[in-house]
Image (cartoon, rainbow, N blue to C red):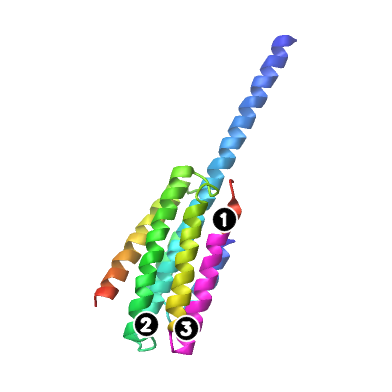
Amino acid sequence: MADTQLITALNILTLAAGLEPAVLQMIMTLMGNSQGMTGDQFLAQADGIWANVIATANKEIGK
Amino acid sequence: MKNRTKLQLIGLVMILAFTSSEFICNGYAKAGELSRDFAAGIQAFQSSEIVFHSAGKVSDSEHAVIQTWVLRVAMTGQQLDAAINTTHNAKDAQAAVNAAIDATTGLLNSGVLGVKNEESKAALQTSLVTLKAILGSILALGGH
């Protein structure tokens, strides 16, 4: 279910030409490797993503 | 006969304990996966907004407001991950889920809806509404 929602959002952003292929590729790779992962592993991935989002937001705000 | 009944009971308890812990662990993994998907979606949203800004479709001031809200969403996302990790289920992480929903609503109402370029606004708005639904899916997991 969540995969469907995420893919829908990615499709919308891709169609609007607002999503870099590298970011799309990174997310698709993460989703493709989800089989058999534990809760701890998913949360570790999420924390890594949030760290990137925060670093990027701080950089963009500071420009 | 008495010993046999006792053994059967112990067996039943062991099966129940195993299946219930399996169920809890699967719920934890599902909550973790949903949280990861939400984070990935927000990263895609952020990246897209930067592309629109670079293309001149989102102004500097709109960009600064949106990225400030993205920062808030990311911080509530980190708190959500910590809450799920601590409680190992979605029910007890409800306050953290609601905080993430509030921040995402703020990003939509105070950031995205202020974008003047209609095409960029539509893409960012629709994707964000879809991503917000992932948080609803975490709430829907309840105690599972």
- Which of the numbered marks, if any, corresponds to residue B62? 2
Which of the marked residues, 1 or 2, is nearer the chain's N terminus? 2
Q: Chain of mark 3?
A: B
Crowding around mark 2 (Cα neighbors within 10 Å: few <14, some 14 to 19, many 20+) is: many
Our reading of the magenta stretch's main secondary structure is helix
Crowding around mark 1 (Cα neighbors within 10 Å: few <14, some 14 to 19, many 20+) is: some
Which of the marked residues, 2 or 3, is nearer the chain's N terminus? 2
Label 1 – label 2 distance at C-alpha: 31 Å
Residue A16 visible (yes or no): no
**Residue annotated with mark 1:** B139
Q: Which residue does the image show at 68% across and 20% down from the upper left?
A: B9
Circle 1 sits in a helix, a strand or a loop, which is it? helix
Type of the residue with mark 3: Lys
Q: Dots 1 and 3: beta carbons under 8 Å?
A: no
Crowding around mark 3 (Cα neighbors within 10 Å: few <14, some 14 to 19, many 20+) is: many
Do the dots labelled 1 and 3 sit on one chain? yes
**Residue annotated with mark 3:** B121
Asked if residue A24 lies in the magenta stretch, the reply is no
Chain part drawn in magenta: B115-136
